[in-house]
Image (tube, rainbow, N blue to C red):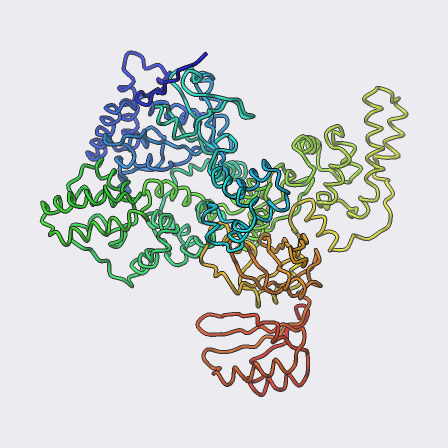
């Protein structure tokens, strides 16, 4: 039979609040809760606060969102009661005073001039968004909502993965049965940048055009792939979206089951169009970090710190930000924000709000950041096109930084209502030409009523239009600035607790653990290897300047084994390997766990060395396990027990007389079982040389690729590392190239070694090699230009300021060419900033005494230096 489906886009299917309001309406309940909190926060005598609250409640009631606010209040209140940390706000909801009074957000919008209309206004056609951040227990909130509203009314939202250009080519190639190698070759001609289309790739690649013209099969492949591009390929669960219906969702939207439970077969925007309530429940690692830090402060100092009440003007917090030491600080970890903090030098909370709005591609690319920083330090006078702009733009030095400022200008100068101003802001942000043209006339006319001439009004409109694309949501920035401040506060006041919490949340990321361990070192905090008697499941402070590695971070050691280890410690510390095996539950601690603990250094407080324990542990484990089984089966007599204890448990175990294993072996085990080099690093030996000749590290490079961090140039990148992995690849021309993974103290990166570089430096490309790499970035890939062994001697030539002219430079080139060899030549130019350059290998030299004499004659003895193979 045929079925008729009618989709209703006009009705709202919002759930009703299931709570009991007694004899009063839900609106009165909302008003009562808001008024109670107004009194609690000491704002009930503030006429501005009372007026704003009443105004917001009126709009909420008029637009039919009373239940919506109560629903959000209810699950946020549940989170508070269950000790689940809730974020201070996200997006435009932080502009609502009612949200603040209900505890949905943590920032008073009146203090920072945040606009309610940016969040909700009568002209707004789409539903408001209250997105909430939770700590790692966010799944408990979703479960609570399912229980509260009925499982049939709640679902997570589906999201469709669409076919990108390369994927479309590969999928169509498979369907057409074209050989995989050929398809792969065509797909690789499409640049790897996100969002690129086949037609864009076609314009960029002559090779692709060539294949298309000459090969019928390729033509068909590309034509069909272009049609498939952008089509849904698979469905998965949206990271945060949850939908709550007024009725059984199966009557309203198509559903399907997924591992996570029921999900919708419509994406988020379609659900909104159908009048359903969707919310984002986001898991935010930084809230978990705050919670863990507060728990450690309570355990260690007996202090119940209320992080939401700490003063926002603590000088120590701003000193930390000004130094740029913001690793671990929310939203400020990247090199971009470290640099911005050092340049801006924030000393008040509004500076942090501005900083988060500035650190984005728009402001960075437009010159707005430089203008703002110059104004902040009095190097640029703020300019206002008209005096009436000063009250609106004073805090941002005459520049439009926030979307709310565009709205205020439209309202106070153009005579718009705030709702209309929000629509204008959106239109400008989306560059809607027709709307902008029609609104310009209206704005100029409105400005005229405020005594502003048409020329000036047009200039103001131009300024609004220009900055609307860059403007940031101030409410969002303010809420996230609070999280940034709180994490900086904890880092300054409770460094050991904060860093331990930070490390505990990244145990699954070797890069992050390595980065934070290095940061601890710089802060004067020693991160110690795991200790069987002192370590807990997670990282744990030991005094104010030591942190013990968490047992959970050891490879092969699970939570059940850790629980058994901690239970066994209740009878006192373990004194030896055999004592440990006697007392721990061997059903949960198997032989593999024991081996991992030895290799990770968890038994280092025992008298025996790692080497001795590794020889003996299997035999001891077997004995202990047989004894446990005998006891469990009730087969032991009193004499058996005495005999067993005497022969095994009285510390009479004979260990072989061998010394501890070499340092390199200990480090290799640390790397394998802890994921990082902890007690030392293989590159430590070359520290001085790396400090002298590297201008970036692996973490900085990764930052540049992931966040498009333009602080790092794209060429002349010099960094050192250990080659962790090498994958060889034969090119179409039958030449060898390689893909390398390289690691230093800060993290790891992948780089490409093309055939010419491969053939020149092949001897330095073995896994385990310690190397200095010169590279450049192209299409988000790191391309090697040269790879030098760190044990190699290096010649450094120092040029001060403008001391070297064309003739002298020519003479220098001639001298270097005269003594060819394999010693790389670095040129250091010492001007206002130190600039380092690795010369082309045609200028590399041999170690001749005559070379040194000629360089001394040309440059002077102090202006060249031969650096030996290892740190001298």
- Which residue does the image show at 48% across and 61% down from the upper left? 713
- Which residue does the image show at 56% across and 57% down from the upper left? 782
Please, is residue 444 above or below residue 565 in the view?
below
Please, is residue 466 above or below residue 841 in the view?
above
User: Which of 435 and 672 lies nearest the eye of the viewer?
Assistant: 435
Tell me if 611 is positioned left or right of 123 in this view. right
Residue 812 visible (yes or no)? yes
User: Which of 233 and 262 lies nearest the eye of the viewer?
Assistant: 233
Residue 236 visible (yes or no)? no
Q: Residue 784: image x %, image y %? A: 59, 61
State which quadrant residue 110 falls in: top left
Q: Residue 613: image x %, image y %? A: 80, 44
Q: Residue 429: image x %, image y %? A: 30, 44
Q: How many discs mark residues in the rendered view?
A: 0
Q: Residue 242: image x %, image y %? A: 44, 27
Q: Quadrant of the C terminus?
A: bottom right
User: Which of 11 and 32 lies nearest the eye of the viewer?
Assistant: 11
Tell me if 415 is positioned left or right of 833 in this view. left
State which quadrant residue 844 falls in: bottom right
- Which residue does the image show at 69% across and 30% down from the upper left? 564
Tell me if 613 is positioned left or right of 563 in this view. right
């Amino acid at each position: 039979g045929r079925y008729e489906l009618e989709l209703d886009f006009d009705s709202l299917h919002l759930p009703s609040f299931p709570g009991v309001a007694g004899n009063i309406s839900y609106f009165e309940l909302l008003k009562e809760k808001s008024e109670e909190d107004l009194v609690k926060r000491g704002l009930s005598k503030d006429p501005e606060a009372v007026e704003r609250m009443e105004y917001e409640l009126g709009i909420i009631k008029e637009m039919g969102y009373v239940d919506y606010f109560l629903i959000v209040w209810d699950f946020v209140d549940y989170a508070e009661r269950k000790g689940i940390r809730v974020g201070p706000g996200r997006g435009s909801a932080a502009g609502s005073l009612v949200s603040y009074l209900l505890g949905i957000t943590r920032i008073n919008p009146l203090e920072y001039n945040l606009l309610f209309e940016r969040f909700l206004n009568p002209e707004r056609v789409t539903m408001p968004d209250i997105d909430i951040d939770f700590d790692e227990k966010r799944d408990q909130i979703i479960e609570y909502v399912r229980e509260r509203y009925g499982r049939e009314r709640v679902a997570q939202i589906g999201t469709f993965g669409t076919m990108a250009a390369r994927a479309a080519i590969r999928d169509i190639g498979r369907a057409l049965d074209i050989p995989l190698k050929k398809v792969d070759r065509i797909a690789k001609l499409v640049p790897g940048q996100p969002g690129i289309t086949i037609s864009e790739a076609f314009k960029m690649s002559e090779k692709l055009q060539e294949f298309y013209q000459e090969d019928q099969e390729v033509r068909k492949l590309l034509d069909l792939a272009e049609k498939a591009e952008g089509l849904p390929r698979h469905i998965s669960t949206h990271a945060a979206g949850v939908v709550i219906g007024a009725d059984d969702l199966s009557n309203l939207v198509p559903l399907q089951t997924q591992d996570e439970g029921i999900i919708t077969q419509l994406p988020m925007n379609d659900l909104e169009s159908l009048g359903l309530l969707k919310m984002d429940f986001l898991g935010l690692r930084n809230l978990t970090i705050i919670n863990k830090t507060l728990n450690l402060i309570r355990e260690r100092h007996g202090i119940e710190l209320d992080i939401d009440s700490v003063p926002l003007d603590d000088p120590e917090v701003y000193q930390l930000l000004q130094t740029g030491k913001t690793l671990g600080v929310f939203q400020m970890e990247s090199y971009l924000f470290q640099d911005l903090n050092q340049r801006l030098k924030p000393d008040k909370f509004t500076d942090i709000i501005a900083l988060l709005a500035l650190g984005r591609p728009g402001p960075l690319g437009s010159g707005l950041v430089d203008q703002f920083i110059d104004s902040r330090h009095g190097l640029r006078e703020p300019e206002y096109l008209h005096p009436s702009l000063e009250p609106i733009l004073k805090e941002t030095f005459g520049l439009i930084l926030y979307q709310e400022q565009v709205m205020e200008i439209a309202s106070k100068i153009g005579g718009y209502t705030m709702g209309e101003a929000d629509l204008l802001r959106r239109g400008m942000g989306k560059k809607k030409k027709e709307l902008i043209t029609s609104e310009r006339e209206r704005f100029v006319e409105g400005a005229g009523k405020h005594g502003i001439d048409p020329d000036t009004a047009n200039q103001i409109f131009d300024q609004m239009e220009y900055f609307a694309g860059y403007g940031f949501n101030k409410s969002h920035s303010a809420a996230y600035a609070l999280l940034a401040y709180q994490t900086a506060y904890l880092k300054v006041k409770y460094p050991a607790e904060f860093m331990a919490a930070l490390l505990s949340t990244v145990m699954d990321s070797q890069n992050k653990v390595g980065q934070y361990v290095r940061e601890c070192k710089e802060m004067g905090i020693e991160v110690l290897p795991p200790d069987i008697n002192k370590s807990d499941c997670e990282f744990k402070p030991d005094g104010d300047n030591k942190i013990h590695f968490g047992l959970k971070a050891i490879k092969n050691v699970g939570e059940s084994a850790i629980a058994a280890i901690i239970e066994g410690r209740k009878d006192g510390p373990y004194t030896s390997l055999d004592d440990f095996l006697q007392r721990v539950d061997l059903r949960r601690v198997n032989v593999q766990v024991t081996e991992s603990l030895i290799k990770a250094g968890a038994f280092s407080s025992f008298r025996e060395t790692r080497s001795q324990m590794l020889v003996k542990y299997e035999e001891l484990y077997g004995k202990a396990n047989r004894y446990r089984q005998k006891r469990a089966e009730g087969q032991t007599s009193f004499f058996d027990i005495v005999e067993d204890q005497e022969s095994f448990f009285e510390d009479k175990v004979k260990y072989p007389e061998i010394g501890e294993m070499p340092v390199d072996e200990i480090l290799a085990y640390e790397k394998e079982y802890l994921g990082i080099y902890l007690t030392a690093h293989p590159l430590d030996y070359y520290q001085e040389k790396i400090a002298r000749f590297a201008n970036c590290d692996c973490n900085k490079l990764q930052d540049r690729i992931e966040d498009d961090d333009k602080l790092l140039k794209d060429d002349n990148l010099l960094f050192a590392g250990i080659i962790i992995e090498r994958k060889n690849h034969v090119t179409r021309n039958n030449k060898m190239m390689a893909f390398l993974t390289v690691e230093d103290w800060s993290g790891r990166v992948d780089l490409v070694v093309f055939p010419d570089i491969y053939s020149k430096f092949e001897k330095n490309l073995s896994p385990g090699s310690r190397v200095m790499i010169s590279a450049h970035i192209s299409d988000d890939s790191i391309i090697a230009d040269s790879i030098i062994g760190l044990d190699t001697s290096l010649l450094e030539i120092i040029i001060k300021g403008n001391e070297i002219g064309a003739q002298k430079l020519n003479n220098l080139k001639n001298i270097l060419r005269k003594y060819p060899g394999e010693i790389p030549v670095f040129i250091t130019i010492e001007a206002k900033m130190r600039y380092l350059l690795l010369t082309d290998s045609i200028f590399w030299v041999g170690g001749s005494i005559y070379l040194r004499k000629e360089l001394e004659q040309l440059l002077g003895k102090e202006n060249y230096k031969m650096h030996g193979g290892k740190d001298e």
